Image: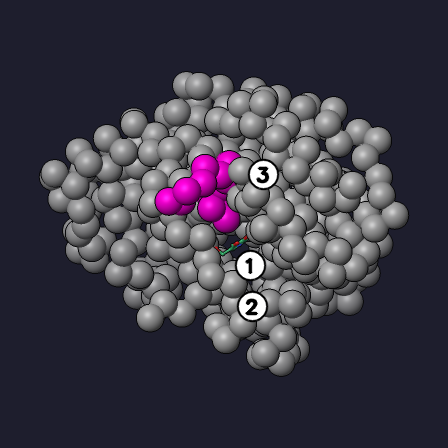
Amino acid sequence: MIWYPYEQMKTMRQPYKIVDAKGVYLYTEDARLIDSVSSWWCMIHGYKHPELTRAVKEQADRFSHVMLGGLTHEPVIRLSEKLQAYLPGDLDYCFFSDSGSVAVEVALKMALQFYTNRGSGRNMVLSLQHAYHGDTFKAMEVGDDEDYHFAFGDGGKKNVVHIPTEIWALEDAFAKYHDRFYCFIVEPLLQGAGGMRMYDVAFLKRARELCDRYDVLLIFDEVATGFGRTGNRFVADLVCPDILVLGKALTGGYIGHAVTVANRKVFEGFYSDDDRHALMHGPTFMGNALACSVALKSIELFEKENYMEKIRNIEAITKREMEGFEDPRVKEVRVMGGCVCVEVHDAATLKGFQQFAYERGVFSRPFLKYMYAMVPYVIGEEELVRVLDTMKAWFL
Ligand SMILES: Cc1ncc(COP(=O)(O)O)c(C=O)c1O
């Protein structure tokens, strides 16, 4: 029997059974649904993209997987070279893993060991209120999302300081603990699972300044925001972190894979004649050949077919369609790049919305007080308007 995620198995609604998927559509036996969630935000090119499917098949005909322990291969070499050229600054050193949560763990271990290799006892992390960095334990520890992680108490949070996305709070935290922080980890500009919260780049610029001044590593968790979701290719293009984490859309959603990319300064903190300074981490499936092949094709499509323009269109249409939309039950409507969120005052307001959307040909998965859409970037105007109309229609 399948044990489903985030569900009380006793009371959960039967999931919709998908029998096919193509473009922005999911097919059940008797319905066609626009996927407004992009399968947890990763399916940026839509389903069954012929070029991505071909990339996987061609690689599978050669080999699907070999470990990176003592071995290497063409797809992982090419992907790391591509990322090195594609990412800003000197974010050049790619450590692959199988999921976003693991890649966050790697980033945190990397940051901590960077200081222990120097003999420093820094042991605190700065992070954001409402942060979500994944469901593994250290990722949870730096997260601040009671709605996901309430069952685990404070999970060792005493070494983590959570602040709101306000410059005064940032300055205050650095004033108190600057010599104890080994990193500041953030979901830049858009906090996803914590409620699609959006904030200003000025906060990140100030964070960069303070991290530089006090020699604290800045980590951007762009597992959700990377590859265009905020309307920027990467938020790292605006403010460059020391460590960047990518996942989800890295493989166009085809295969779970992620990467933790370090800059030269971080890499050099491990590069020595001392074996004990090596990064002791190695997921079995890191650098999986199918994942790397499809990631290369995904990035190629992203560039060749000018996805940033597609995302600008999605943002413009969304703003146009949501303009003036209000309802006493709605607290706020937020739009950024390829993300729209309708936050309501009371979670009960959204009960039944998923079935309502299903009946209108849209798959949606609101959570808590947040009704949102993060559509595949290949969506057409008519389909996008249908998603947004369905969201608004719920309040009529
Ligand atoms: C910002 C962020 N970091 C990390 C993760 C965890 O990624 P994964 O589900 O691939 O472990 C997520 C997943 O939603 C995320 O949104």
Mark 3 CB within 8 Å of ligand 1: no
In this rendering, does residue 274 appear at all? no
Secondary structure found at label 3: loop
Rounded to the nearest whole Å, what is the CA distance between mark 1 and mark 3? 33 Å
Which structural element holds mark 1?
Answer: loop
Residue nearer the viewer, 256 or 27: 27
Mark 1–mark 3 CB contact (< 8 Å): no
How far across and how far down the image is residue 42, in percent?
Answer: 46, 43
Q: Are marks 1 and 2 in contact (CB under 8 Å)?
A: yes
The mark nearer the N terminus, 1 or 3, is: 1
Residue topped by disc 2: 140
Residue 36 lies in magenta, yes or no? Answer: yes
Please identify the quadrant where the N terminus is shown.
bottom left
Q: CA distance from mark 1 to mark 2?
A: 7 Å
Residue 189 lies, with reference to residue 130, above or below; the image says above
Q: Which residue is mark 3?
A: 360
Q: Examine the structure image and report whether residue 128 is included in the region drawn in magenta.
A: no
The location of residue 184, given as percent across then percent down, is 63, 57
The residue at label 1 has a CB less than 8 Å from ligand 1: yes
Instruction: Name the one closer to the observer, 366 or 362.
Output: 362
Name the kind of residue labelled 1 in the image: His
Q: Callout 2: 10 Å neighbours few (<14), some, many (20+)?
A: many
Quadrant in which residue 48 is drawn: top left
Q: Residue at x 45, y 37 (%)?
A: 32
Residue indicated by mark 1: 133
Q: Which residues are magenta?
A: 28-42
The kind of residue tagged 3 is Arg
The x, y position of residue 187, in whole percent, is 61, 50
